[in-house]
Amino acid sequence: MTGRRTVSVLAAALTLSATAATTACSVLPTASPSPACTVATEPAGGVPMPSGNLPGWTQIFTDDFDRCELGDSWGTYSGQPGGNPLGEWNHSMVSVDGDVLELRSERTDSGWVSGGVSNFPVAQTYGRWEIRMRADVSDDISYHMLLWPQDEQWPPEIDFAESVDGHREEMSAFLHWKKPNGERDKHGVSIAGDFSDWHTVGVEWGPGIVRYLLDGKVWAEAHSDEMVPDVPMWLGMQAEGGSCERRVDWGLEPCSEDSDLRADEVSVEIDWVTVYEPDFAVLEQMYRDGQFAPTDSAIQFTDR
């Protein structure tokens, strides 16, 4: 059972999301196969990957990771996340085991090493993305599912699923944009739930509108020409270390050394990914029919 709420971790997540993908993204599509890899016959997340088009959306990419290597549709992150000296990305922390894509994080003597990937070959202006995923509980590791500008000129950024909450009891969504006067701005909202369990997170993005999806339902949305980007973007999925050490900077309570959420190894698992491009002829008719009017039950980004 999930419920919508704005939470204290927003300040932390806003800082993280602004820096999460600012390191170099190296193209290393041949992440090492997992030992004793066996291709699964049933979806790990309990929900089959969608197949086929949706009203207004044409499916252009799917990946259920039913193989033993990453593949050439993905590149792995490497180097230090921008603004975070406590973490590092390394391609060795990304693996595919015939069932899921795993983004691992490991505590080392020099800090946290984590995994992240980009779906950079599938960049587009506007579309729909969905991910079936879960994350281990951890005070130290955050996760980020986002759209990043193809030209690397930040902002904009659309973060549709991320969490700095150690219990994984809340998930946040954000927008980063540039005002007409050139100043950067951002806004975020959160929803409650058990995100250590499997959920389908997603986003629909069109001219002047972004709708955030959880298990197929709109839970937050932005209707704004200023907030919503109009440049090509690609999907990034990443884990990042150092959340515990940075909590004081974010105005949050420090982590307890006795916490049971301080494991030295943490995983974020992705069962499948699907991407759609817009069918504007159909979407325009849906818009005229009122199907993209503000959703009564959704948080509105313009209610700041």
Image: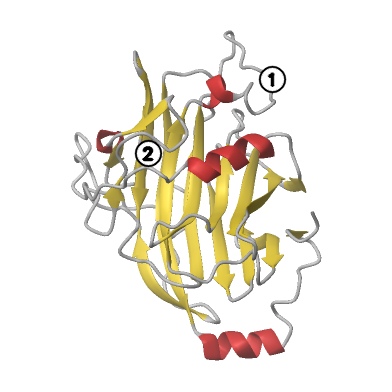
Q: Quick one: quadrant of the C terminus?
A: bottom right
From the viewer's perspective, is 26 left or right of 250?
A: left
- The residues tagged by marks 1 and 2 sit, at their Cα atoms, a distance apart of 27 Å
* Residue 208 drawn above or below residue 20: below
Who is closer to the viewer here, 212 or 131? Answer: 212
**Residue that label 2 marks:** 103
Question: Which amino acid, by three-letter code, is at mark 1?
Answer: Glu
- The residue sitting at 54% across, 38% down in the picture is 16
Answer above or below: position of 131 versus 126.
above
Left or right? Give the position of 297 relative to 101: right
Pick whichever, 71 or 132, lies toward us.
71
Seen in the picture, residue 73 relative to 57 is either above or below; the reply is above
Please tell me the numbered disc located at residue 209: none
Outermost residue to the top:
258
Whether the residues at callouts 1 and 2 have beta carbons within 8 Å, the answer is no
Q: Which residue is mark 1?
A: 253
What residue appears at the point 51 percent right and 18 percent down from the top-left corner? 262
Q: Residue furthest front?
A: 181
Residue 81, picture quadrant: top left
Q: Secondary structure at mark 1?
A: loop
Mark 1 or 2: the one toward you: 1
Q: Position of residue 146 (x, y in %)?
A: 49, 53
Q: Is residue 281 left or right of residue 303?
A: left
Going by the numbered disc 2, the residue's amino acid type is: Leu
Q: Residue at x 18, y 47 (%)?
A: 30
Q: For the residue carrying disc 1, how many other residues have a C-alpha within 10 Å: few (<14), some (14-19), or many (20+)?
A: few
Estimate the x, y position of residue 292 in percent, counting from the top left: 69, 77
**Mark earlier in primary sequence (1, 2):** 2
| Residue 54 versus residue 301 in the image, above or below | below
Can you see residue 139?
no
Percent of width and height locating residue 221: 69, 63
Q: Secondary structure at mark 2?
A: strand
